[in-house]
Image: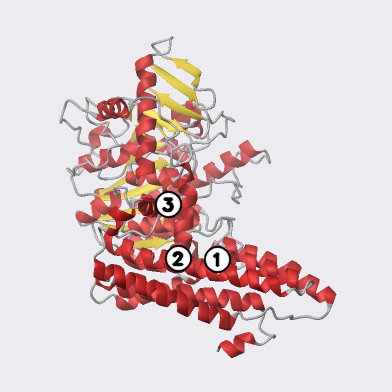
């Protein structure tokens, strides 16, 4: 095989990438063998699939590792100096040594902690004495021997496969063409393809067994991602003594009563959660929004429980997903879902419902790997995950995938055979830019505002048809529907995204399982979408202690407030005043007075303490 790869007709860059794919695969085999006890009984074949699902991320890492060798090779084509190959040999040998040491360390770290090697774990190298205390002399000797043998074999194989800078093309024009095209291919390989978003860990996630996903994730890529994310390890939002901040934050969530208003007909209903893309309150007429954008929704409110003061903490779908399903608010400079090592530490609404016997499913018409949503959903035990790949080609009529009508119809059809009780989540997408729905509406202008309202009108029509059909199903009377937006939007009123008005979202509870006495009622308490886990689980008599950022607003003693952020400001909404605090200027940028016309220092301190502890917790996960 080595002789074959040394033939000039096999491009050097191809040999380079093949070497790294083989090397990563060999350490995956070691990883599975070393942690064999973590594979559930009878699941070995499922675990071995990790070699297939690992290919994309392995190829991405191999392309990145091949940039320097290719650059040296390209220069060598015009300046045939042997020193260039010597430099490449030194660089590649160094990479082999580094990958080997990190991969062997990863075996031990994962075996002990159940997480891959991250920058946080790497930090223990600063304390070698304490670190070595976790390893027996026998195991240390084994690991050192494994490193030595792996480095020796790796270098030998590399030098056999990539032993020369073969000149592939004699023609200067063709050579220039080859050298021009190859970097583009490396760039495409390094970002994982031509899809909208660069590759992430979700490309390797395929199983509900967490170990399998970890085995399929390239540990070098994972570590590099961890280092990049940890570049901001210092809490940028430290405003006070940590114990003071913790005390203030805890008081925000303390309640003096154990009372809980019951909103259900029974405590084990089916639950359907519909997460509405960009459904700001500004499109809902009963919430003070534009007229006739959502006419069916407006009518449906009359038989539902409407929240008039719910706010989204972030401005991205992945932030809303985490807020709604894990009760964890958005952070200004991070999105925790993009770091599976951190996201895995979060509580999960689905996981707690699973313990109660609920059968779960998640429906989305787009690419489920976007922003690492797939890894998060699998880690939180969603059993059925539907995305664009489950729809017919003619149904993929949106830039993002399948429009809402197809997603809603598919979920409804699947629920006819779903076991009860079920927990099914739908994430809509038609109200996402570029608002490309094909339907006749009262909004037919080409302006962005009109296009947004047109898309919302379309989704409203889809929901109308969905609920008309759902009401015919025998499971409807025992089903609770929760409709909530993933985040607000600047449209249709061109809101300033620093202001709270842009963060007020649509939220409603309806369905046959809703108590009849609450139909047509409104909840005016100020709250966040991340309060939903505490609200729902409290109704099911499940402890919400681990959802420390989620509050049950149906408890009369719960404090009213809402938080939001972006890279610019911290927003804090209370019955007395809304505070918009600027990070760059370190001062209140704007005060929206309600009952108090001057800045209330106590309220401002609560907002700062909330953000300080939230960001501290994110950094420590």
Residue located farthest toward the left when viewing the structure as drawn: 258
Q: Quadrant of the image for the N terminus?
A: bottom right
Q: Position of residue 321 (x, y in %)?
A: 40, 46
- Compared to residue 195, the image places residue 52 above or below, namely below
The residue carrying mark 3 is: 339
Q: Neighbour class for label 1 at 10 Å: few (<14), some, many (≥20)?
A: many
| Total residue callouts | 3
Residue 177 versus residue 195: which sits nearer the camera?
A: 177
Question: Who comes first in sequence, dot 3 or dot 2?
Answer: 2
Of circles 3 and 2, the one toward us is 2
Q: Secondary structure at mark 3?
A: loop
The residue carrying mark 2 is: 218
In the figure, residue 118 lies in which quadrant? bottom left
Disc 1/disc 2 C-alpha distance (Å): 9 Å
Q: Neighbour class for label 2 at 10 Å: few (<14), some, many (≥20)?
A: many
Q: Are marks 1 and 2 in contact (CB under 8 Å)?
A: yes
Q: Are marks 1 and 3 in contact (CB under 8 Å)?
A: no
Q: Position of residue 507 (x, y in %)?
A: 39, 37
Residue 5 versus residue 156: which sits nearer the camera?
A: 156
Could you tell me if residue 417 is visible in this image?
Answer: no
Disc 3/disc 2 C-alpha distance (Å): 14 Å
Could you tell me if residue 451 is visible in this image?
Answer: yes
Q: Position of residue 193 (x, y in %)?
A: 59, 64
The residue carrying mark 1 is: 60
């Amino acid at each position: 095989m080595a002789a074959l790869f040394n033939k000039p007709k096999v491009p050097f860059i191809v040999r380079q990438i093949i070497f790294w794919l083989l090397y990563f695969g060999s350490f995956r085999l070691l990883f599975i063998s070393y942690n064999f006890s973590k594979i559930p009984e009878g699941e070995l074949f499922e675990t071995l699939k990790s070699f297939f699902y690992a290919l994309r991320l392995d190829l991405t890492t191999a392309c990145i590792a091949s940039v320097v060798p290719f650059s040296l090779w390209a220069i060598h084509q015009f300046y045939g100096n042997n020193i260039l190959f010597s430099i490449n040999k030194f660089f590649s040998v160094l990479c082999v040594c580094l990958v080997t040491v990190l991969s062997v360390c990863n075996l031990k770290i994962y075996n002990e902690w159940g997480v891959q090697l991250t920058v946080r774990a790497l930090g223990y190298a600063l304390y070698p004495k304490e670190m070595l205390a976790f390893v027996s002399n026998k195991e240390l000797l084994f690991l050192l021997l494994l490193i030595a043998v792996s480095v020796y074999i790796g270098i030998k194989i590399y030098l056999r496969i990539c032993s020369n800078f073969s000149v592939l093309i004699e023609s200067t024009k063709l050579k220039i063409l080859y050298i021009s095209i190859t970097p583009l291919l490396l760039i495409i390989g390094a970002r994982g393809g031509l899809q909208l978003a660069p590759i992430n860990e979700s490309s390797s996630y395929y199983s509900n067994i967490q170990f399998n996903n970890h085995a399929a994730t390239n540990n070098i890529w994972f570590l590099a991602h961890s280092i990049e994310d940890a570049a901001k390890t210092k809490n940028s939002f430290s405003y006070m003594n940590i114990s003071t901040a913790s005390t203030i934050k805890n008081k925000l969530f303390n309640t003096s009563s154990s009372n809980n208003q019951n909103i259900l007909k029974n405590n084990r209903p089916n639950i359907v959660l519909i997460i509405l893309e960009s459904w700001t309150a500004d499109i809902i007429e009963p919430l003070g929004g534009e007229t006739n954008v959502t006419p069916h929704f407006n009518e449906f409110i009359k038989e539902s429980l409407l929240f008039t003061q719910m706010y989204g903490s972030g401005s991205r779908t992945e932030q809303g997903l985490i807020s709604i399903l894990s009760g964890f608010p958005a952070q200004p400079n991070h999105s925790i879902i993009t770091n599976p090592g951190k996201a895995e530490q979060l509580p999960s609404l689905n996981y707690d419902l699973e313990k109660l016997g609920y059968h779960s499913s998640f429906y989305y018409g787009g690419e489920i790997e976007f922003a690492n949503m797939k890894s998060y959903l699998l880690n939180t035990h969603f059993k059925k995950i539907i995305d664009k790949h489950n729809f017919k080609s003619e149904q993929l009529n949106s830039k993002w995938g399948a429009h809402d009508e197809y997603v809603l119809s598919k979920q409804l059809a699947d629920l006819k055979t779903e076991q009860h009780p079920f927990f099914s989540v739908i994430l809509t997408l038609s109200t996402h830019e570029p608002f490309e729905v094909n339907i006749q509406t009262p909004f037919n202008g080409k302006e962005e505002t009109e296009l947004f309202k047109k898309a919302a009108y379309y989704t409203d029509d889809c929901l109308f048809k969905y609920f008309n059909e759902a009401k015919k199903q025998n499971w409807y009377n025992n089903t609770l529907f929760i409709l909530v937006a993933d985040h607000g939007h600047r449209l249709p009123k061109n809101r300033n995204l620093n202001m709270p008005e842009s963060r007020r979202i649509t939220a409603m509870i309806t369905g046959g399982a809703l108590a009849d006495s609450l139909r047509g009622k409104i909840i005016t308490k100020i709250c966040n979408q991340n309060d939903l886990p505490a609200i729902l689980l409290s109704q099911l008599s499940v402890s919400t202690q681990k959802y420390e950022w989620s509050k049950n607003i149906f408890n009369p003693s719960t404090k009213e407030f809402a938080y939001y952020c972006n890279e610019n400001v911290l927003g804090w909404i209370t019955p007395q005043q809304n505070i918009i605090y600027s990070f760059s200027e370190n001062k209140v940028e704007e005060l929206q007075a309600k009952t108090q016309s001057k800045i209330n220092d106590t309220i401002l301190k609560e907002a700062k303490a909330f953000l300080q502890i939230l960001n501290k917790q994110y950094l420590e996960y």
